[in-house]
Image (cartoon, grey):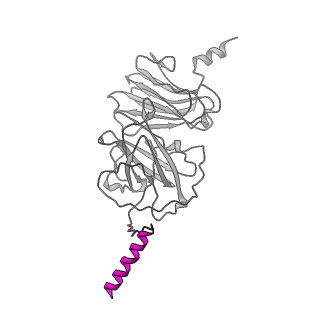
Amino acid sequence: MKKRNAALAAAITGALAAGGILVLTIISDDSKPPASSEATPAAAVTTAAVTEPITESLPEVTTAKTTTAPLKTTPTTTAKTDEKPSDLRRFKVDVLLAPMGFRVEDDYVLEIAKAEDVHSKRDSHLDSTDNIFYSASVINGVTELALADGKYELCIYPEGRPDNFKRYTWTISKDTTDRDLQLIVTEKVAEGQMMIVLHWGEEPRDIDGYLVGEDDFIYYWGREGRHARLDTDSKKGSGIETITVTDLNGSFRYTVDDYSNESELGKSGAVVEVFTSEDRNPTIFRVPEGIKEVWDVFALKDGRLTAINREGEMICPEKIAAAAAP
């Protein structure tokens, strides 16, 4: 009887194959699928823009936990298997290299864990104690994720160079947009230096960062000073502007001005990230709602940051000259 059944099964399989029908045996496990994160020591992602929840049906994916190197793919992650596809939100995540702001050309490794599962210190990699559910390569500076609402920790670093890692925190909600998950990475910041990166959305077209000190007035016309330089000036929206402080000795103030003055700066989604040689986690400042045109972001004294985060006074020389003209 068993031989007859086996022969019958073989005949049926052959007939199905001849008809172009593929039969798969699917083996699933209880391993966790992907999620997402945000960035900065002590700052969660908050945005003004609203992203509608994804209601389309997503394929159910299960992944096996492994200690092997990440696959060189750009996958779409999914949430835990006990979460419904309708609870997931899809995002496209850009990884930009400061100071210039282009998408990274090298492959980067992205690892994500739920914040509640993370036990490692923030100045170290995520590790096996953190229940990492997603680990894969980011190819050509962009990847796609499907994530449920919640808080996540992530670690990103160039493939083969795990010592140059950055840690971020993401908070996912109905208000989260692709821009909120944009990741800024840098080469290692030189000892005793600081990199200040300003980035924002499509509007306004042109906003500018200013670093003002006793011997420095760094902005789009004053690119070189005694202690700092302007590396990048963006004038077309969705850009990044970078100032590198080469000597931290002294007192400075960092301010953002809405040069184009097309809409309220507080609605621009502007973010300032500060990178140092000592801290793996950038310090992040997000423009407060209600800021009209000038945002005083922080003070810097001998390498120590102090948040200001309030409306500032006019700082753009062109605007000051225009206001003083008869």
> What segment carries the magenta color?
1-30
Rendering coords of residue 256 (x, y %): 54, 28
Rendering coords of residue 156 (x, y %): 38, 44
Residue 98 placement, left or right of 84 = left
Q: Residue at x 46, y 58 (%)?
A: 79
**Residue positioned most to the bottom:** 1
Rendering coords of residue 128 (x, y %): 31, 55
237 lies above or below 222: below
- Which quarter shows the C terminus? top right
| The image quarter in which residue 238 lies | top right
Number of marks in the rendered image: 0
Q: Is residue 278 something one can see in this rendering?
A: yes
245 lies above or below 53: above
Residue 29 placement, left or right of 289 = left
Question: Which residue is nearer to you in this view: 185 or 146?
Answer: 146
Q: Is residue 43 something one can see in this rendering?
A: no
Rendering coords of residue 264 (x, y %): 64, 33
**Residue positioned most to the right:** 326
**Does the magenta run of residues contain 255?**
no
Question: Which residue is nearer to you in this view: 284 or 11?
Answer: 11
- Which quarter shows the N terminus? bottom left
Question: Which residue is nearer to you in this view: 149 or 43?
Answer: 149
| The image quarter in which residue 228 lies | top left
| The image quarter in which residue 109 lies | top left
Q: Residue at x 32, y 86 (%)?
A: 2
